[in-house]
Amino acid sequence: MASTKNRTEMMNVKKYLIVVVAILFFPFCSNAQPLKSDNKILIVYLSRTNNTKAIAQLIHKKVGGDLVALELETPYPANYGATVQQVVRENESGYLPPLKTKIDSIQSYGIVFVGFPTWGMKLPPPMKSFLKQYDLRGKTVVPFNTNDGYGIGSSFDTVKELCADCNVLEGFTIRGGADTDGIARLTKDENLKEAERKVNDWLKKIQLVKQKS
Ligand SMILES: Cc1cc2nc3c(=O)[nH]c(=O)nc-3n(C[C@H](O)[C@H](O)[C@H](O)COP(=O)(O)O)c2cc1C
């Protein structure tokens, strides 16, 4: 009788230990890395025809934080061809267009998403202005991009160069607009739904998952 009681007690102790070990080690086994509440998020994006803005909004919906559109002191021309030519000249001379947008307390953010379209297969000059103007050292930087089907070009590499002391995570890229004919592809519902699935998969993959509660 006594030995049966002892065995039952031992089994209970074992069960208890298993539960304690499982609780202690669960965070290391889980793929998700919940965002800590003290890790403030900033989502900065450049968007001329709202495709990159649509992706920025999807990211914001999933991870929260502050959403900021980059605006210039002197906007680019409305005409596509004129903008292309101006960007070519700016890239050749290394001109950094001054930003109208000011970001308060950049030091308070731990994670900074940077979104932009591909321009001339490069990072657009205004995003270079942002990355040079603000000190993002020590922060996690997450690039995202839309383009007209030709990809990111050198844009993600330039983000890494300009953020040498940042932890730059794997970026996200998706087909955006055909700027020449003014189609903002990602503002259409069916494309947006597909984009949302892709954004959510990417956020899971890079382990930026919104904390529950
Ligand atoms: C000045 C300029 C240059 C562009 N160059 C490229 C390019 O090199 N490759 C590409 O795939 N798309 C290019 N595009 C198209 C945009 O990347 C694409 O339409 C993007 O989705 C626009 O994003 P937005 O709506 O957020 O402005 C260019 C657009 C502009 C305005």
Image (cartoon, rainbow, N blue to C red):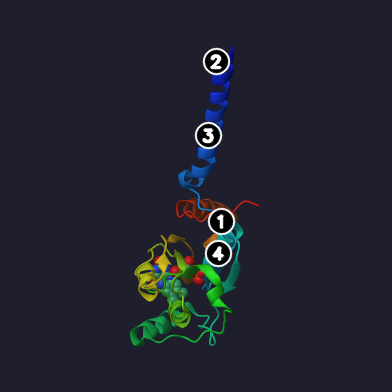
Q: Residues within 10 Å of mark 3 (few under 14, many from 20)?
A: few
Label 4 vs 1, first from the N-terminus = 4
Question: Residue 192: which numbered mark, if any?
Answer: 1
Q: Residues within 10 Å of mark 2 (few under 14, many from 20)?
A: few
Q: Secondary structure at mark 3?
A: helix
Where ligand 1 lies, by image quadrant?
A: bottom left
Q: Residue furthest top?
A: 1
Label 3 vs 1, first from the N-terminus = 3
Residue drawn at point x = 56 percent, y = 52 percent = 193
Q: Secondary structure at mark 1?
A: helix
The residue identified by callout 4 is 39
Q: Nearer the viewer, residue 1 or 174?
A: 1
Label 3 vs 4, first from the N-terminus = 3
* Closer to the eye: label 4 or 1: 4
The residue identified by callout 3 is 17
Q: CA distance from mark 4 to mark 1?
A: 28 Å
Q: Secondary structure at mark 4?
A: loop
Q: CA distance from mark 4 to mark 2?
A: 54 Å
Label 3 within 8 A of ligand 1 by Cβ: no
Please report contact status of discs 2 and 1: CB closer than 8 Å, yes or no: no
Question: Residue 93: which numbered mark, if any?
Answer: none
Q: CA distance from mark 3 to mark 4?
A: 33 Å
Residue drawn at point x = 46 percent, y = 47 percent = 28
Q: CA distance from mark 2 to mark 3?
A: 21 Å
For badge 1, the amino acid type reads: Leu
For badge 2, the amino acid type reads: Ser
Label 4 vs 2, first from the N-terminus = 2
